[in-house]
Amino acid sequence: MALTSAEVDLCNQSISKISATTFTFGDVTSKESKKCLLFFDQIRNALLRSFEWPFARTRLRLVSGWLTDTVYTTDQYVWQSALLYKAAEAHTSDVFATDLTAVKWVLVSSIDAWITATAYALNALVTINALLYQALVAHTSGTFSTDLAAEKWILTSTKPTNVFGFNYDIPASSLRLVENQVVNTRNVNFNFFGTYTYPTSDRPADTWVLETNTILTNDTEVDIVYIDTIDTTTEWDVLFTELFIATLAKKLLAALSGSGPGTTSLRADLNKEIDELTKEANTVGSQEGNNSGSSDWNNARFN
């Protein structure tokens, strides 16, 4: 892997801040190029994750019913004939059977009708009497009424202890999950001004949880907003670019110039610049959109 010409230009701006030696595009052997390559992606991703940068916010209908003539990414799930599929490739949907034959969808899980004398694993899902149930324990089924009374099954509309009905991977490029909205089931409350919808952060905590890169939930339709890995530098916000250059310079200072007394003043200047750019980016971000759910953005002007 090598840095692009645009990435080298950013690295050289960082290097110039600490009065080190710049390098040219295609140089993969100098100390400067090696250190920039080592730190570049790490710092970019850390800065993207640190704030809800508007230019990196991406909205996705993660899970829904399958639709024809619709653009799907490899990160999306669909329900078709009570079966859950995940897109194997980005495509615009045609007839589902045609797309399935072309291996554009991969079956993730199935929901079969409950049957007796059958071995069921923990978390297995079955349908019976038009209701969806989830196995609380591994067992071999007897009669359903007996197993239900023995608490071997539970309706997925009721949250089982430490058990969820479905697991949905968030996009591989996601650096931060900003919102997870259960489609058409957000809580509603009433106050003196009329009926309003709770923000995502006020919904019951047992609606979903995020573990590693997977959303655990009992819901079959989910919308998400996440911070995407924007690795094309021309798509970066100008304030993000300036913050990146200053942060990379601070990282390179010790790597290229050491940590002696001569670097103390430079480090202090970089810390001040980073602090000012961070506050400016937060303030601008809070003014550009409704970020009421993010204390980072709303409180920036008070820092």
Image (cartoon, helix red, strand yellow):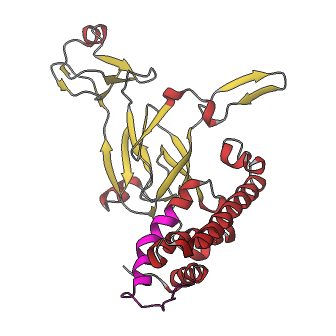
Vertical placement of 16 versus 261: above or below? Answer: below
- Position of the N terminus, as image quadrant, is bottom left
Residue at image location 29% in from the left, 9% down from the top: 145
Q: Residue at x 68, y 43 (%)?
A: 295
Residue 285 is drawn in which quadrant? bottom right
- Write down the quadrant of residue 235 in the picture: bottom right
What segment carries the magenta color?
Answer: 19-45
Residue 32 magenta-highlighted: yes
User: Could you tell me residue 12's position as x and y percent?
Assistant: 55, 84
- Residue nearest the observer in this picture, 153 or 80: 153
> 45 left or right of 188?
left
- Between residue 267 and residue 147, name the one nearer to us: 267
Q: Is residue 121 above or below residue 80?
A: above
Question: Residue placed at 32% from the left, 33% from the top?
Answer: 111
- Among all residues in the image, which is located at the extreme front? 261
- Place of residue 195 in the rendered image (x, y in percent of width and height, measured from the top left): 77, 26
Say whether residue 33 is magenta: yes
